[in-house]
Amino acid sequence: MEYIILGHVNVDVDSIVSGYLLEKIMTKKGYKASFVIPDEEVAKESEDLCSKYDLSLYQFKNRQLKDDAKYILVDHNVRDVPGEIVAVIDHHPVLDGEKKDNYYIEEASSTACMIAMDNEEYLNKHDIELACLATFVDTASFHSTKTRKSDISWINEMCTKYEFDYDKLYVDGLCLTSLKDVDEILFNGFKEYEFDNFIVHSSYIQVADKNKSNEVVDAIIDKLKDYMSDKKIDLYVFIVYDMSSFYTKVYEISKDGIDTSEYNLYASRGNTVIPDIKKKYC
């Protein structure tokens, strides 16, 4: 039996590292498993950061989905696939439907750290560093509301054990968005959500200082208004993270106008912002 591992659409660093780690672990355990990235494009920010840590995506992007394979989802729990989903490994809440017996879901900082913590004996130093990187990135270097305290302890333990550069991982984990090209960042971190036929699209940017980014944000909002007029969706959620104060501003764009909400912290999109959106609109 062949198993295909899939991250979410528009894979980010956590999806990529989780898929890579799970493929390695399953192969060492004797399973036929392969991580596949079927997306035509991967966010340049994610691909560049993986490349910086010596993880090339080339091999994963050249693989195909198969109808007769069994599928394992990592870092998400809903996706249309051509075969049977036999397992889910994720750290996001189940927002559409109920958690099933084959769903391995924890309120962890990243899916990669969930996988690595339970399987360290199958991984080498480079693999562990990638799991640390994914955890820094997915929590904005532990400033996100999704951060689990025990994961910080694990990261500190791994950095000491393997002599990783904690400061480098911390800075890379902040993932500041380049604001040079509005069109290029318009759909940064793009994801789709659906709750009882209420369809939401979302993206975000992480800026050094929101007050110095207002013109770019205004330009993005104008373009997203046009995007809404052409799409059959109910809401576009655009999030601006100010990494100087770890403040979050959410723009809720509908065909009727724009509402905004704010959090005086780094509000995780999957664990905080989108669940709040669901409560508000559904």
Image (cartoon, rainbow, N blue to C red):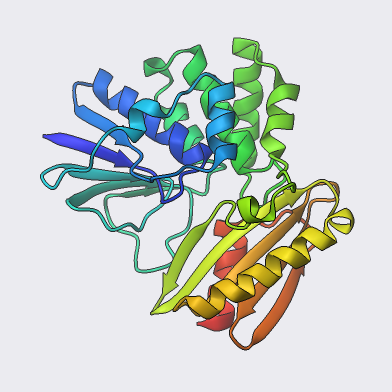
Q: Going 82% across and 62% down the picture, which residue do you hit? A: 215
* Quarter containing the N terminus: top left
| Vertical side of 120 occupied by 279: above or below | below
Task: Please state the horizontal and vertical placement of residue 93, each as a whole percent of the image.
Answer: 47, 58
Nearer to the camera, 141 or 57 = 57
Task: Please state the horizontal and vertical placement of residue 183, each as a whole percent of the image.
Answer: 63, 55
Work out whether residue 260 can be spotted. Answer: yes
Q: Quadrant location of residue 251?
A: bottom right
| Vertical side of 192 occupied by 206: above or below | above
93 to the left or right of 173: left
Q: Going 85% across and 46% down the picture, which residue do you hit? A: 244
Nearer to the camera, 241 or 96 = 241
Q: Going 69% across and 50% down the picture, which residue do you hit? A: 181
Q: Going 52% across and 34% down the picture, which residue do you hit? A: 47
User: Which residue is the extreme one toward the bottom?
Assistant: 256
| Vertical side of 217 occupied by 138: above or below | above
Work out whether residue 141 can be spotted. Answer: no
Q: Quadrant location of residue 239?
A: bottom right
Task: Please state the horizontal and vertical placement of residue 2, each as a whole percent of the image.
Answer: 15, 34
